[in-house]
Image: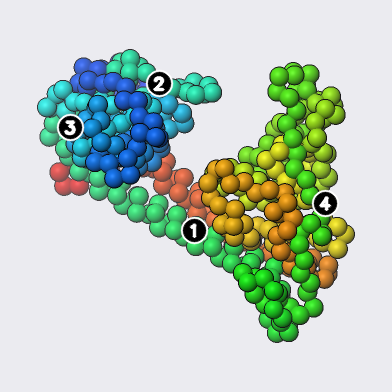
Amino acid sequence: MRKRYNSYKDSGVEWIGEIPSHWIKGKWGYYYNSGMGSTILKEDLVENGEVPVYSATEEDRIFGYINNPKLILNEGDIVIPARGNSIGHVKLISSKSTTSQTTIYSKSKDENLDSRYSYYYCKGNKTNLFPFIQTAIPQITVTEISFNPIIIPPLSEQQQIVSYLDTKTSLIDSLIEKTQRKIELLKEKRTSLINELVTKGLNPNVEMKDSGVEWIGEIPSHWKTGKLYQYSEMSNGSTPSRVKPEYWENGTIPWMSSGEINKKKIREIDGRITKEGFENSSTKLLPIGTVMMGLNGQGKTKGTVGILEIETTCNQSLCGMIFKDVIYPMFSYYYLDSQYYHIRGLVGEGQREGISVSFLGRYPFVVPPLSEQQQIVSHLDEQTQLIDNTISIEEKRIELLKEYRQSLISEVVTGKLKVTTDE
């Protein structure tokens, strides 16, 4: 049965609603001294520095280390990311550290307020406490933080709430971690399945031969090997001049940016250029069935493969591959998808090490007969869809667990759910 407090009163804050009668409402600035973190740049970091540096991240992780920081944070202090999409993802400091200019720090000035409770209060009410307008670089200010409402139970109840939420959120986090691991195993299974079929085929009893490529190993004896340039027309796109509005305004020609490669099967394109922009750039109109690859980027984009289900042009950070008639486009898509980590390993993981079209053209390519390519694709479509459906179910489970965790914290720290010593 849901436990409630004996009596309630209006908090005076619409999104909080009623709170237990013996709790009080105040302003964050009354209980915490807050300020912006120190200016710390990447080049200021020291490999074996003494003091960890927090920055604006969603995860509870550090930016690096530094010696002799201007600002010292201690156990119980709070860091609030104040810039970008990580705004409001609070961190509770557990040992001596510092924080950068992309965050706000808060130091308690009331011994009757447990910062562990304040941490949960911020986490449970993040959306209402830290709203921001989605601009190029969204940010929140110290003044905004200082005027935030905070609901405060007696210290003994704060400690009960912290103990209860530590236990409950730990259980939820454990379930999330197990589910994430299951998703990773499913993704590994998917990659392994694709790699096996695009290099070994569907018949386990077929005669094999050495492919001549170390990381591919043996392939069916009747398959061919070659280079990508031998089987496709390859080119990267370009970006029409940004200073000429006539190249962009009211454009009708789809223009694909590199981030859209992560959609994999590309059915919609957000960007548009005009006919004049198209004619005054070197980008080409790529047909349906073109296999695309991201050429640059430090994240997952570099080496990621997609296939067009719409005609489009693209920017210079993408390579379009139009395969000859002896190649079934979806086979080449699956093949290159299976080579993602190997390609990235060859060119390097850093942001500056991009994939060139000439490098990609020389990349080894395995070619079964067209009929076998189609059979392999048909089998992979079916099997990967089953795996993807399972992944989607598990991802939804994680979202529900996160929503439940957020709701539980919010209900407890605003008094909608009573915590007792026997829990």
The CA distance from mark 2 to mark 3 is 24 Å
Q: Which residue is mark 4?
A: 233
Identify which residue, 397 or 354, lies in the foreground.
Answer: 354
Label annotation for residue 114: 3
Secondary structure beneath label 2: loop
Which of the marked residues, 2 or 1, is nearer the chain's N terminus?
A: 2
Secondary structure beneath label 1: helix
**Disc 3: CA contacts within 10 A as few (<14), some (14-19) or many (>=20):** some
Residue 375 visible within the image: no
Identify which residue, 296 or 208, lies in the foreground.
Answer: 296
Q: Give amino acid for label 2.
A: Ile
Residue in view at x 68 percent, y 48 percent: 356
Residue in view at x 33 percent, y 15 percent: 143
Label annotation for residue 140: 2
Which mark lies nearer to you, 1 or 4?
4
Q: Give amino acid for label 4.
A: Glu
